[in-house]
Amino acid sequence: MPFDYDPENIFAKILRGEIPCDKVHETEHSLAFRDIRPQAPVHALVIPKGPYATLDHFCEEATDAEIVDFWRCVGQVCRSEGVEDGFRAIMNARKNGVQEVPHLHVHILGGRPMGRMLDPA
Ligand code: 5GP
């Protein structure tokens, strides 16, 4: 399956500096910023700087350096956002995953009990 990437998605615009974000952390290959519609006291998004739409796209085509950098950035965000009591990491993909922005991102949610993993469909 070839992977598509739309360079006009909102996170690509954030990466190009065309729209602002509330930055949490930045590394060579990754950027973390706060979600514009937070669903918990802590709600950060971590994205790779490269043009990857989904987790499977990233796992197939990103370099080892990008993959390591991304997960190290996630770890740094967890430390700096103070989620010692626990957090949830969510990655949505495509239609069935109800992905709104087609640029890979992991949601880091915390600061309160997060409830069960999934609502009944
Ligand atoms: P998805 O449903 O794709 O996993 O989540 C996309 C997330 O991006 C949503 O939680 C939404 O609130 C967030 N979001 C959408 N547009 C913007 C934006 O312009 N800035 C920021 N910081 N977050 C955004």
Image: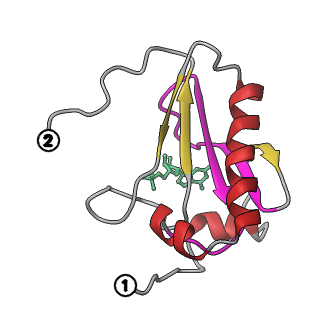
Residue at image position (57%, 71%) is 52
Q: Which mark is residue 21?
A: none
Stretch in magenta: 29-53
Residue found 53% across the figure and 25% down from its top = 87
On screen, residue 69 above or below 116: below
Left or right: 39 in relation to 12? left
Please tell me which residue lies in front, 2 or 26: 2
Q: Please state if 102 lies on the left or on the right of 19 as rendered.
A: left
Secondary structure beneath dot 1 equals loop
Measure how far apart labels 2 and 1 are at the Cα level: 27 Å
Count of all numbered marks drawn on residues in the image:
2
Q: Residue placed at 64% from the left, 72% from the top? A: 62
Residue with the most extreme front position: 64
Q: Residue at x 44, y 14 (%)?
A: 113
Q: Amino acid at mark 1?
A: Met
Is 90 magenta? The answer is no
Report crowding for label 1: few under 14, some 14 to 19, many 20 or more residues within 10 A (C-alpha): few
Residue 1 tag number: 1
Task: Say left or right for 107 vs 15.
Answer: left
What kind of residue is marked 2?
Answer: Ala
Between label 2 and label 1, give the one nearer the viewer. Answer: 1
Q: Quarter holding the C terminus?
A: top left
In the rendered image, the vertical position of residue 6 relative to residue 37, given as above or below = below
Give residue 37's position: percent from left, percent from top.
52, 40
Q: Which mark is residue 121?
A: 2
| Residue 12 or residue 25, whichever sits in front | 25
For marks 2 and 1 on the same chain, the one whose residue lies earlier in the sequence: 1
Name the quadrant containing residue 83: top right
Question: Are discs 2 and 1 less than 8 Å apart at CB?
Answer: no
